[in-house]
């Protein structure tokens, strides 16, 4: 028997404990150990009842995602579940933590399910591009009905044990489920209580009409299935559960599961899952523990500062919001109040928590109010002199050991840190807007940031419910640097012959929610214009520079807020229409440079945009601004709308083959050596027969 599964026999009860940290994933060793333990219990005449429980923080949170794509080892999860469902001795499961995916499917075949209150139960497979492949699509609808089962499987969202109790998915709630399961088994042995066999509890669908109508409703709610095939296959399986004999239903699910597992979408979604976890292990932390943070100062109550403050009080921090005078402070606090209220309206915040959270924030107009804080996040105007001044002032006031975090998007944080006497305590926390919706934070580490300060940046991000990615200091860190490369490539195409509308359509067809020019219109064209003007003095005049964006701004076309940018907007409208004026303006720019417009296909737009991103990503890796390719993918997926089911630009480059992408970059470099020259990392990968994904494992 493997050590990940332990057995204890006492008074006719075999207690089988799964112990496979961190989340008791049902990898091969666990499945093998479980089956061996069950078989031993079945063949032991002294054992009358079986209790299944899990050590540590959770009941199995699913199949082992890291084993997907490797040859499956026997017993498979469906085989294990099938064996358990045929147990002639009653089986009780004791659930706690996250009962997810294969973990829930295993629990579904027990005769009695006991859960700790607050336990989360769900089938999140759809978020990995697959479906429950351990019998879940067949057993869950039988147990709780097709409609709620489809709801769980199509959203992938868990429900609480309390709700599961209402649905009949959990039989008993108990604070100590292991002890309760043991008591239930003993009571049955003593003849004092009933304990059904799984086979006795098998439910056959009764209301076929309701079942079929739930299936039809779910089918109507599906989007186009080409991009993400899993939801449609889940619905097919639930239909099969009604229409086919049980064994055939399970076989149908198995085929669909294997099909989905082999899709590139599922591979990309699994890559995204692992990238998120991998990013939480940044280098430079060593064994350092995070500093204790309870009270945070926020400088600036603009949209961003207010968003950060709202997130902080929501995560239980005490917050002091600083503004320059009473009027600005009132406006800042009003912004926090509005965002807080919206959280209640949108159901993100329990109304009962509103008062409690709001009591955690106070305003100040004097920096001295920051004396007791453990950390400050400054979200002031994006200007080096302004931010340096603020950091220097904060440094004078805040207590020793307090961390100074800056929410800059581009500035050199090494230089900002020089303005303080505590450069080791300075870090970048680059939030994305709007803060409540964007889960990404770039944790920007300077040459001197202390390891425990890095650890604190990650701990704060986690407590805020965000995903942190470590970035080094450079202009734009990881994300904005990638964005600049993306936009440069598409700006070149505008001059060469594409329209902004063709570019946007091509990138939306690739899977972005919006194209780059739609995004610019939404954000306001003046933001990047101001930056370009600021960088103008340092620009190399021999480099190709596309001035179309500048011309639009000069013509007052500042985007949605001005009613016109790359698109034309009706009063207050957010959906733009194409505008021939913009095309004329672009034509004039081409004429001025003597460029004759050429046709540019959708495929070419996508290829160039993706090659530009991957090449910038390679440079970012060479410069160690990002630690691994999957960190870059994660930033692009979580911060910039790169479709998650594509897995990010570095994975896309791997998929095509680094050699092909390198050669394409070489071709493009004949037009513009400075922008398109392939980063040396491509040659290194090709020479060693490696991919970017191989670097993730290093
Ligand atoms: N397989 C392998 N490793 C897993 C895993 C899984 N299913 N779930 C979590 N882990 C690992 C993570 O990679 C991480 O590893 P690391 O510490 O080495 O980086 C560790 O467990 C802790 O995970 P988190 O950092 O995510 O911890 P949290 O406490 O924030 O969250 C969780 C815990 C809610 C369980 C979350 O990890 C989660 O949602 N996991 C995925 C659950 C899932 O998708 N299950 C379905 C799998 S597919 C399946 O079961 C198919 C079946 O139908 C055939």
Image (tube, rainbow, N blue to C red):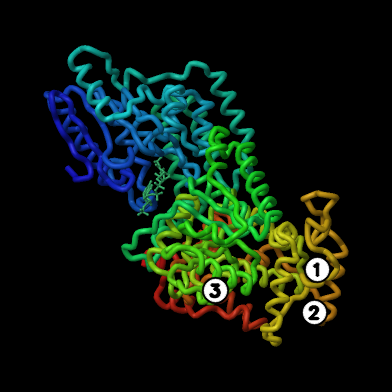
Report the mark closest to the observer, 2 or 1: 1
Name the residue located 51 percent from the left edge and 65 percent from the top edge.
Answer: 397
Query: Measured from the top left, where is residue 660 in percent x and y?
Result: 53, 72
Name the residue located 53 percent from the left edge and 33 percent from the top edge.
Answer: 236
Residue 614 visible somewhere in the drawing: no
Towards the viewer: 38 or 366: 366
Tag 3, which secondary structure?
helix
Q: Which residue is mark 3?
A: 416
Task: Determine whether 177 is above or below 508 in the image.
Answer: above
Ligand 1 is within 8 Å of the C-beta of the residue at disc 3? no
Towards the viewer: 483 or 267: 483
Towards the viewer: 673 or 544: 544
Query: Measured from the top left, where is residue 329 in percent x and y?
Result: 66, 54
Residue 291, by quadrant, is: bottom left
Residue most extreme to the bottom: 542
Name the residue located 73 percent from the left edge and 57 percent from the top edge.
Answer: 522
Question: Do the numbered discs 2 and 1 sit on residues whose CB atoms are within 8 Å?
Answer: no
Task: Determine whether 695 is above or below 103 in the image.
Answer: below
Q: Which comes sooner in the sequence, label 3 or label 1?
A: 3
Total numbered circles: 3
Tag 1, which secondary structure?
helix
Q: Which residue is mark 2?
A: 595
Q: Which residue is mark 1?
A: 553
Query: Measured from the top left, where is residue 272 in percent x and y?
Result: 48, 54
Tag 2, which secondary structure?
loop
Query: Measured from the top left, where is residue 266 in percent x and y?
Result: 48, 50
User: What's the distance in space between the residues labelled 3 and 1, CA to CA?
Assistant: 30 Å
């Amino acid at each position: 028997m493997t050590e990940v599964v332990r057995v204890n026999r006492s008074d006719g009860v075999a207690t089988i404990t799964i112990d496979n940290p961190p989340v008791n994933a049902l990898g091969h060793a666990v499945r093998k150990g479980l089956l061996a333990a069950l078989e031993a219990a079945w063949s032991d005449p002294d054992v009358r009842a079986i209790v299944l429980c899990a050590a540590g923080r959770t009941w199995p949170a699913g199949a082992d995602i890291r084993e997907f794509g490797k040859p499956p080892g026997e017993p498979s999860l469906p085989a294990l579940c099938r064996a358990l469902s045929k147990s002639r001795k009653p089986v009780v499961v004791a659930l706690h933590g996250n009962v997810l995916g294969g973990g829930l499917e295993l629990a579904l075949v027990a005769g009695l399910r006991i859960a700790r209150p607050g336990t989360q139960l769900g089938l999140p497979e759809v978020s990995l591009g697959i479906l429950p492949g351990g019998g879940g699509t067949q057993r869950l609808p039988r147990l709780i009905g097709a409609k709620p089962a489809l709801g769980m499987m199509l959203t992938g969202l868990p429900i609480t044990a309390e709700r599961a109790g209402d649905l009949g998915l959990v039989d008993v709630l108990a604070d100590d489920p292991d002890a309760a399961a043991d008591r239930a088994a003993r009571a049955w042995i003593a003849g004092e209580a009933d304990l059904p066999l799984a086979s006795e509890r098998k439910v056959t669908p009764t209301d076929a009409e309701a079942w079929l109508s739930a299936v039809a409703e779910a089918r109507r709610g599906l989007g186009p299935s080409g991009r993400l095939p899993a939801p449609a296959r889940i619905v097919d399986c639930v239909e099969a559960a009604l229409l086919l004999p049980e064994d055939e239903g399970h076989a149908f699910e198995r085929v669909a599961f294997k099909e989905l597992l082999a899709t590139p979408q599922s591979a990309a979604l699994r890559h995204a899952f692992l990238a998120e976890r991998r990013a939480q292990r940044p280098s430079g932390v060593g064994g350092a523990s995070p500093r204790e943070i309870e009270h945070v100062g926020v400088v600036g109550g603009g949209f961003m500062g207010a968003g950060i403050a709202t997130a902080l009080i929501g995560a239980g921090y005490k917050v002091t919001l600083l503004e320059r005078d009473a009027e600005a402070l009132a406006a800042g606090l009003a912004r926090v109040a509005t965002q807080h209220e919206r959280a209640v309206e949108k159901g993100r915040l329990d109304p009962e928590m509103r008062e409690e959270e709001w009591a955690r924030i106070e305003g100040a107009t004097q920096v001295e109010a920051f004396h007791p804080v453990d950390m400050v996040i400054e979200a002031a105007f994006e200007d080096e002199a302004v931010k340096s001044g603020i950091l220097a002032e904060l440094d004078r006031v805040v207590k020793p050991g307090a961390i100074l975090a800056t929410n800059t998007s581009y500035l050199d944080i090494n230089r900002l840190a020089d303005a303080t006497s505590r450069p080791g305590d300075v870090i970048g926390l680059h939030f994305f807007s709007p803060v409540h919706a964007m889960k990404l934070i770039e944790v920007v580490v300077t040459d001197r940031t202390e390891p425990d300060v890095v650890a604190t940046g990650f701990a704060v991000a986690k407590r805020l419910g965000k995903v942190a990615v470590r970035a080094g200091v450079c202009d734009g860190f990881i994300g904005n640097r990638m964005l600049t490369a993306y936009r440069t490539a598409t700006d070149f195409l505008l001059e060469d012959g594409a329209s902004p509308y063709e570019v946007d359509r091509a990138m939306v067809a690739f899977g972005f929610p919006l194209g780059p020019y739609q995004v610019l219109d939404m954000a306001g064209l003046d933001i990047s214009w101001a930056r370009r003007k600021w960088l103008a003095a340092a620009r190399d005049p021999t480099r190709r520079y596309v001035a179309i964006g500048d011309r639009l701004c000069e013509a007052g076309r500042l985007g949605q807020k001005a009613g016109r940018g790359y698109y034309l907007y009706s009063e207050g409208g957010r959906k733009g229409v194409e505008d021939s004026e913009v095309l004329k303006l672009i034509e004039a720019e081409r004429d001025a440079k003597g460029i004759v417009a050429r046709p540019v296909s959708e495929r070419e737009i996508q290829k160039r945009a993706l090659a530009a991103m991957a090449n910038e990503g390679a440079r970012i890796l060479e410069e160690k601004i990002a630690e691994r390719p999957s960190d870059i993918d994660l930033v692009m997926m979580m911060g910039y709308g790169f479709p998650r089911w594509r897995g990010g630009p570095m994975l896309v480059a791997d998929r095509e083959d680094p050699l092909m992408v390198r050669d394409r970059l070489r071709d493009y470099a004949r037009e513009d050596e400075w922008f398109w020259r392939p980063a040396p990392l491509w040659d290194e990968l090709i020479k060693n027969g490696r991919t970017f994904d191989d670097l993730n494992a290093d």
